[in-house]
Image (cartoon, rainbow, N blue to C red):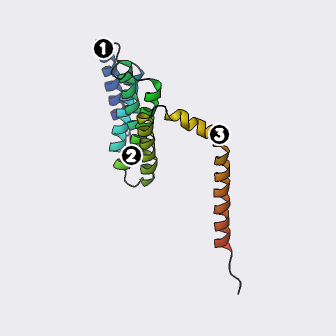
Amino acid sequence: MRSRRYPSLLGWVLLLFGAALLLDRWQPRLLGWSTVMIALGVALFYLGVARDRGAVFPGAFLFLLGLLNLLRNEGVLDLPWSLTWPLIVMALGIAFVTLFLFDPSRKGAVLPGTILIVIAFVFLSFPGAWLDILAFVSSWWPLIFVLIGLRILWGSMRKFKRTRTPEL
C-alpha cells in the first residue's frame, strides 16, 4: 500500500518548480538564492504547522534570511554589513520565539530567542558597540575558562553532597 504523502510531495515539488520557472520568465532578477530560501522557508513552515512542529524553526529562519537577502539585492535595504548581521541575529531570535509560539511545550526556545533579539537591538542601536565588546573579550577571554571551571567544580561539589549518605 502506497503512502499518501508521496503524491502530495510530488505535487508540491511540481508546483514550486513551475512557479520558479514562471517567475524566472517574468522577473529574471528575482529568481535566485533569496527566492529559493523564501520558498524553502515557506514550505518548511507549512510542514511545521501541519505536521512536525520542529520544522517551524528552520522554516521561519530561512524565510526571514531569504527576505532580508532579497531586500538587500533589490536595493530596498541599503545597509552596511555592520547593520546587516544584527538583522540575521534577530531573524534567528524570531525563529526561536516562533518555534515556541507554535509549540508551547518547547519553553527552552524562549530564552535564546529573547537574548538574540535583545543582542540584535543593542547592535542595531549602537553599531560600533561590537568593536568595544571585541576589545573587552580579547582582553578578558581567559575569564571564560575560569567561570566554566568554577561551574564544573560547583556542580560536582553539589552532586557529591547529595550522594554522600549520613552515617548513623
Residues 111 and 16: in front is: 111
Residue 136's place in the image compared with 34, above or below, is below
- As displayed, is residue 120 above or below residue 26? below
Could you tell me if residue 143 is visible in this image?
yes
Q: Residue furthest bottom?
A: 168
Q: Circle 1 sits on which residue?
A: 27
Which quadrant holds the C terminus?
Answer: bottom right
Q: Is residue 150 left or right of residue 23?
A: right
Residues at marks 3 and 2, CA–CA distance in whole angstroms = 33 Å
Q: Secondary structure at mark 2?
A: helix
Instruction: Return the x and y of residue 75 as percentages of the image width and height.
Output: 35, 18
**What's the distance in space between the residues labelled 2 and 1, CA to CA?**
34 Å
Q: Residue 13's quadrant in the figure? A: top left
Place of residue 4 in the rendered image (x, y in percent of width and height, measured from the top left): 34, 39
Name the residue located 36 percent from the left edge and 28 percent from the top edge: 67
Q: Amino acid at mark 1?
A: Gln
Q: Which residue is labeled 3 in the image?
A: 139
